[in-house]
Image: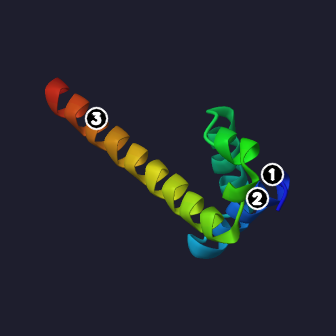
């Protein structure tokens, strides 16, 4: 599949598996693309499969969840230090 179709597949899977709305799924993929996350996929056509798209959707979603949890913990620590 083309690089663009692969990114579309990842985005679609984010909406279907994790029930993200279109805007949130698109933002997650665009942000990852801006961080050069998909460079290897662009360079190597064999990486652009539906199975790989599922893996990348999972990795992006879990990475975002971990980032959110870390930020929440940091905010709690900051609040407790001020108290």
Q: Residue 71 at what x, y percent from top left? A: 36, 39
Q: Residues within 10 Å of mark 3 (few under 14, many from 20)?
A: few
Q: In this view, does 2 lie above or below 15?
A: above
> What residue is shown with label 3?
74
Q: Which of marks 3 and 1 is in front?
A: 1
Q: How crowded is mark 1: few (under 14 residues within 10 Å), some or many (20 or more)?
A: some
Query: Is residue 20 visible to us here?
Result: no
Q: Which mark is residue 6?
A: 2
Q: Residue 21 at what x, y percent from top left? A: 68, 64
Look at the image and tell me in which quarter the N terminus lies: bottom right
Q: What element carries label 2?
A: helix
Q: Is residue 74 left or right of residue 1?
A: left
The quarter of the displayed image where residue 25 is located: bottom right
Scheme of image coloration: rainbow
Q: Earlier along the polypeptide chain: callout 3 or callout 1?
A: 1
Residue at screen point 16% across, 33% down: 80
Residue at screen point 83% across, 53% down: 4
Q: Which mark is residue 82?
A: none
Q: Residue 46 at what x, y percent from top left? A: 71, 58
In this rendering, the count of numbered labels is 3
Kindly indicate whether the residue at mark 1 contacts the one at mark 2 (C-beta within 8 angstroms). Answer: yes
């Amino acid at each position: 599949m083309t690089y663009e179709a692969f990114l579309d597949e990842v985005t679609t899977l984010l909406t279907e598996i994790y029930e993200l709305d279109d805007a949130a799924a698109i933002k997650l993929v665009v942000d990852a693309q801006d961080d050069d996350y998909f460079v290897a996929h662009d360079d190597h056509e064999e990486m652009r499969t539906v199975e790989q798209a599922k893996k990348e959707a999972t990795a992006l979603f879990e990475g975002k969840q971990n980032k959110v949890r870390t930020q929440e913990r940091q905010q709690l620590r900051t609040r407790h230090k001020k108290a």
